[in-house]
Every structure is written in structure tokens, then in C-alpha cells.
Amino acid sequence: MLKKVIRLNLDDLLLYLGIEGGVFLLTQIIIGAVMVVAKPMDGILISGITLPVIAGILALLSGVVHVTVTFEQALCFGQTRRRALALTMGVMTFEGVCALGAAALLALMERYLGPPIWASLAGRGHWVVDYPGDWGVLEDCLVLNSFQPDWRLYPVILLIGLGGGLVGGALIQRFGTKGAWALWGVWMAGCFVPEMLGREVFAIGDWNQYTIGAGVVLGIGCLAWSLWSLFHAVVKG
């Protein structure tokens, strides 16, 4: 049954992969243009950080869509709530893993194929990545700085994306338009509250164990409510 649901939603997966591919291609075009026009001494490998974040956002959006559409469709076709939720989470996980896998592959492509192309466009004879010394001693060389998250962050990004999608979808499934407005309010708060508190709020490395613990407890509480809500969901229409 899960394979059938996945096949029915392949167009959504292709859309997500197309978004990632489009962002990757646009990034390479911009960096290439900078190399041709400015002939800089340095550059950046940025897909390793931007694409996993985009994949996590896509996993979240995928979760919201599948909870509000796939889950309810399964209920309307006579599936139990437990089975409908299992199918929904199965297709969410599949799409999230594919999105993060594509992000990792594209980041590897940039890491190994980008530097020689960029060096050539910038008129440099060779290149180095994350050079620890003084750039001034290098001649005819393009120095590239990489932004690569630890590989252990990939499952964390996946879990956050899927968990956020489940919570958001459950809110909309239970409260309808009011739930959607609540999500919008949370999003806007996330955009503007840090500006009011100071940008250092984003310095995750400075968070203490109490801040992290509070976030974990809040996340677990939201997930528990979401599961309860979906297990007691009312079939609409």
C-alpha cells in the first residue's frame, strides 16, 4: 500500500528535487559569473549548507501537505486512523530522505567539480580548499572556503522537518483556517522576535543546556499532541 501512495505522489517529489536542482544551478551560475567578472582570489562552497536547509524546509512542507491531504484521503477510503497515519508518515519520510539525499549529492558535486571550473573562469592555475595559512603567499591560486555541516546534522534536519510538518499538518487538520493562521503567526514571530531580542539569538553554539532542553521538551509536547489529535481526527466531508 505504501508503494502505491509513493507512486501517486511522485510528481510532488519531482517538484521538490526540481527546486533543489534549480537553486543549485542558480548558485553555480552566480558564482561562475563572479569568477568571470571579478577574477577574485577566493570563493565559497555554499551548497553544503544551503541545500540541506532547503531540503529540511521541503520536508516540512511535504509533511503539512500529506497530513492535510493524504491522511484525510486514506480515512475517507476506509483506512483506520493508525494505518492512515502510518502511510502518511511513510511517504513523508521517503520524500524527506530523497530531498536530503539529493542535497548531499549536489553538495558533493559542487565540492569536487566546482573548484576546477571556477579556477579556470577566474584565470587561476590551481585552487585550494580551506587553506589555513596566509593567502598572500599563494600565487595563481583560487582559495575556496567551504561551509559543510557535520554529516550527523542530516538526520537532525530530517527529524525537525518531518516533526514540524506533522505538527503543522495536525493543526490545520483539526482547526482548519484557524490552524493555518496560527502557523503563519508562529512563522512571523520567528522572523521578527529575534530582531527585537538581538541577532545573537541565532548563535546556536551559545545556547545552554536549559535552552536546548526547553526546546526538546516543547518539541516532544507538540509531537505528542499532534499524534493524539490525528488518532482522534474527525473525517470531514
Image: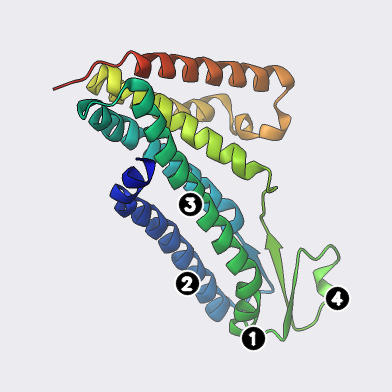
Residue drawn 48% across and 29% down?
163
Give the mark, 1 or 3, whose residue is nearer the N terminus.
3
Residue 98: which disc?
3
The amino acid at mark 3 is: Cys
The amino acid at mark 4 is: Val
Say what secondary structure mark 4 lies in. Answer: helix
Q: Is residue 13 above or below residue 214?
A: below
Q: State which quarter of the image contains the C terminus.
A: top left
Which residue is the site of mark 1?
A: 123
Q: CA distance from mark 3 to mark 2?
A: 24 Å
Percent of width and height locating residue 161: 49, 36
Percent of width and height locating residue 176: 24, 21
Say what secondary structure mark 2 lies in. Answer: helix
The amino acid at mark 2 is: Ile
Q: Is residue 184 above or below residue 7?
A: above
Q: Is any atom of residue 228 visible in this view?
A: yes
Check whether the beta carbons of the residues at disc 1 and disc 3 lie within 8 A of each other.
no
**Mark 3 packing: few (<14 Cα in 10 Å), some, or many (20+)?**
some
Q: CA distance from mark 4 to mark 2?
A: 29 Å
Which residue is the site of mark 2?
A: 29
Say what secondary structure mark 1 lies in. Answer: loop
Give the mark, 3 or 4, whose residue is nearer the N terminus.
3
Q: CA distance from mark 4 to mark 1?
A: 18 Å
The amino acid at mark 1 is: Gly
Give the mark, 3 or 2, whose residue is nearer the N terminus.
2
Q: Is residue 74 above or below residue 152?
A: above
Depth check, mark 2 against mark 1: the one in front is 2
